Amino acid sequence: MATRFLLAFAICRLIVTVGLTLDPTELLRLEVEGVLSVEPADLGAASRDFGGMQNAEPLAVLHPGSAEDVARLIKAAYESGQGFTVSARGHGHSIKGQATTANGVVVQMSGSTKVAPPRVSEKFMYVDVWGGELWVDVLSSTLKYGLAPKSWTDYLYLSVGGTLSNAGISGQAFNHGPQISNIYELDVVTGKGELLTCTPKQNSELYHAVLGGLGQFGIITRARIALEKAPHRVRWIRVLYSNFSAFTQDQEYLISLHGQPATKKFDYVEGFVIVDEGLINNWRSSFFSPGNPVKISSLNADGGVLYCLEITKNYQESNSNAIDEEVGALLKKLNFIPSSEFTTDLPYVDFLDRVHKAELKLRSKNLWDVPHPWLNLFVPKSRIGDFDKGVFKGILGNKTSGPILIYPMNKKKWVAKSSTVTPDEDIFYLVAFLRSALDNGDETRTLNHLTNQNNRILRFCSDAGIKAKQYLPHYTTQQQWMDHFGDKWTLFSKRKLEFDPKNILATGQRIFTPFFNPSAPLL
Ligand code: FAD
């Protein structure tokens, strides 16, 4: 009762102060199993994200108790006379407000205690999970059965619905495809408030639309994720290169082994670029022993830049005798700098959860909740050498402000009908600039400097005719979105019309303007 009163009060106050068009009774009539909150702490949390650069306060936050709660809310928005927007928020790890919605309702998908826990089928090797489940919790539930998902992100405190709305990539993608290629079935609440089950065969248009769909077509309330036998341990190896083409040739060779038996390929292929003079440790690579620091200058880096290949081999404890030989045979084929090999061995879970350790370290130094002007690009293989010359050895100017990941993927492992956009070549690279902005007196660490540098990188690609595509994309005009989707735009907008005809969902992506507010700018 008190919550209803608070909700009514908050909505009326907002109508008076900012002139909302929402009829408060539309939200007040909503019967939910979870909680519809207007607590300032909830509104504040839902208005921010990991990027720390945007703020958009919603009118209310729904902590759903079930998929039906999500359906009731969206149906209310869809049938409402005056209309309101609805955005799913996974764990809020977007960079530019993609999961926010000003003056609408945020559905806080992760952290819900009332929804069903993950349910594993050992027989069919899958797990059914709530759309807001964090991948770290998916892992712990499947490990009880000795099973684990096949395809990962580097960081596990992301929600299933959030990564599936983009793609979900890591070093396993060359082999298994991104996370969206490893989903058997979904439950989705569309922009009309219908709760539908979809698979590659049943409601297949919706299934493909939501995978990589940036939240535009529906809210994923359940995902059925493919599993494999979980390895016990991981041999984790890093080797260095000073020559970019030797580095990319080796990466491309390693991902070409995807069809080989497990003993003849690595399980994970990533890499990163080291442009900073000095220690090559950073939050993403606290791997080289601090007691044995590596200096770029000692390794004859070409143009001041080094490249680190990062590979792993999973194994069962019962197979530990064979692992040295298998790894040795694979390493022999590579052309890294002799004596630049760093190896460690650890439990599979610790490897998967590696970034969380770095997070805890950064949090303890108050360096986690800083602005993150990240830029993620898919660069076609044919132009990665030009990208190296123009960006790593050019625009960056020996300053990183965070890890720079680089690794190739096989396009054939991506579901072509999904909404994700990738370059038009069989092999493309992820290049991820994972920057943290600081206000510590160093101009090159400021948000302004890093944002300008991102813009220079994008301009460089455009001027050089490098047909890169943004991953976790951010644009501010519909024309830019049309350019991003290219040939896929017609299908993307047709799907939007079919599944969210009033443009209610995920307005924080700034792709479509809500039907009931056509004059609102996309910004
Ligand atoms: P949110 O940011 O909350 O949401 C993202 C978008 O998805 C929004 O538009 C939202 O409306 C929509 N959405 C959320 N839940 C649902 C749902 N249930 N149904 C429909 N739409 C929904 N990505 C990778 O691919 N690989 C990585 O290795 C990787 N590492 C990362 C490491 C860190 C430290 C961080 C901060 C991010 C990383 N990411 C990585 C990016 C991550 O995949 C995106 O931030 C993604 O948005 C997931 O975050 P989230 O669950 O918090 O979703």
Image (tube, rainbow, N blue to C red):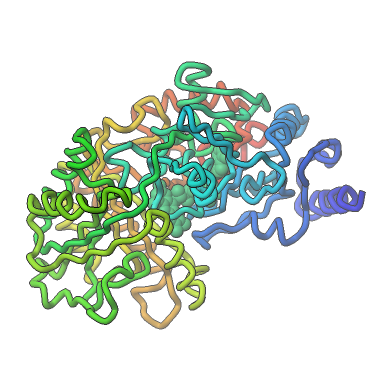
Q: Residue at x 42, y 55 (%)?
A: 349
Viewer-side residue, 455 vs 73 = 73
Q: Which residue is drawn at 23% across and 66% down?
A: 274
Q: Is residue 117 left or right of residue 206?
A: right
Q: In this view, does 355 lie to the left or right of 236?
A: right
Q: In this view, does 175 lie to the left or right of 298?
A: right
Q: In this view, does 421 lie to the left or right of 342?
A: right
The spot of residue 38 in percent (x, y) is: 78, 53
Q: Is residue 81 visible?
A: yes
The spot of residue 150 in percent (x, y) is: 38, 40
Q: How many labels does the image show?
A: 0
Q: Residue at x 28, y 52 (%)?
A: 431
Q: Which residue is drawn at 71% across and 37% down?
A: 66
Q: Can residue 509 be seen in this view?
A: no
The spot of residue 44 in percent (x, y) is: 68, 60
Above or below for 5 versus 519: below
In terms of image quadrants, where is residue 288?
A: bottom left
Viewer-side residue, 242 vs 496 = 242
The spot of residue 195 in percent (x, y) is: 65, 26
In terms of image quadrants, where is residue 45?
A: bottom right
